[in-house]
Amino acid sequence: MKRMLIAFVAAGGLCGHVLAQNIAAMPAPSTVAAGAPKASPGEERAGFVKSVEGTVRIIGSANRSRTAEPGDALAPSDRLETGEKGGASVVLRDGTLMMVGPSSQLDLKQFSFDSTTHEGNIFVELLRGSLRMVTGLIGKKNPEAVRVDTQTATIGIRGTDFIVTADPAP
C-alpha cells in the first residue's frame, strides 16, 4: 500500500505533525539568491541548484546523469535524485523554492515563466521521498498553475509553504 503525507507549514512550524524531519528543519530562504547562474545560449533554464548535501544527481535529457553542485542550472524536464543522506535546495526562476529530502526522486515535468507578466506553470512529480515547496510568483498570481503529483495523489497548490512525502511501492 502506498502512503502519502502532506503537512502545511504556517508561521514557521508544522501544523500538528512532526514529519519529514530532515526537510522540515530546513529553513526556507526569504529571497531568491543573487547571482543565479545564467543559462548557456540556447539552453532553456527552469532554475538552479542552490545547495547540495550528500549525494545528489541530476538526470537530464537522454538519461544523461551528472553530480549536482550548487549553481547548476536545471532544465524544465530534469530529474533530481538524492541519496540516503542527501538533500538539495532548488530555486526556480519565479522564486519558487524546493527543498528535496533524503532518498528522494523528483521530476520537474513542466516549467514555464514569463518574467514580465509573472504568468506560467509548474508541474512536478514526487516519485519517492520528501519535498518542501514554497511557491513563488506563479503561485501568487495563479495558484491553479502549480501542481504536485505523487503516485497516489495530485496536490493543487494555493500559494503556501507545504511538505509532501511519498513512499515508494513495496
Image: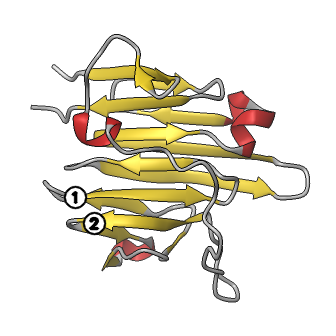
- Give the number of marks: 2
Q: Quadrant of residue 67?
A: bottom left
Q: In percent of the image, x 47 and y 67: which residue is there? A: 49
The quarter of the picture where the N terminus appears is top left
Between 153 and 118, which is closer to the camera in this rendering? Answer: 118
The residue lying at 21 percent from left, 23 percent from top is 2
Q: Residue at x 54, y 49 (%)?
A: 97
Position of residue 61 in the picture relative to residue 127 (left or right): right
Judged left or right of residue 22, residue 10 is right
Callout 1–callout 2 Cβ contact below 8 Å:
yes
Marks 1 and 2, how far apart in space?
6 Å
**Where's residue 27, x and y in %?**
43, 44
| Colouring of the image | secondary structure
x, y percentage for residue 20?
25, 33
- Residue depicted at x 46% and y 63%: 78
Neighbor class of circle 2 (other Cα within 10 Å; few <14, some 14-19, many 20+) is: many
What mark, if any, has residue 86 been given in the picture?
Answer: 1
Q: Is residue 70 above or below residue 162?
A: below
Identify residue for label 2.
56
Residue nearest the viewer, comparing 108 with 24: 24
Q: Can residue 128 be seen here? A: no
Q: Quadrant of the C terminus?
A: top left
Q: Is residue 100 above or below residue 5?
A: below
**Which amino acid does the dot numbered 1 rest on?**
Gly
Give how far across and how far down residue 63 sits, in percent.
35, 72
Question: Is residue 116 toward the left or the right of residue 160 in the image?
Answer: right
**How dense is the environment of label 1, judged by Cα within 10 Å: few (below 14), some, or many (20 and up)?**
some
Residue 82: x and y in percent read 25, 58
Find the residue positioned furthest to the left.
Answer: 170
Q: For mark 1, give the secondary structure.
A: loop
The image quadrant of residue 93 is bottom right
- Is residue 42 in view? yes
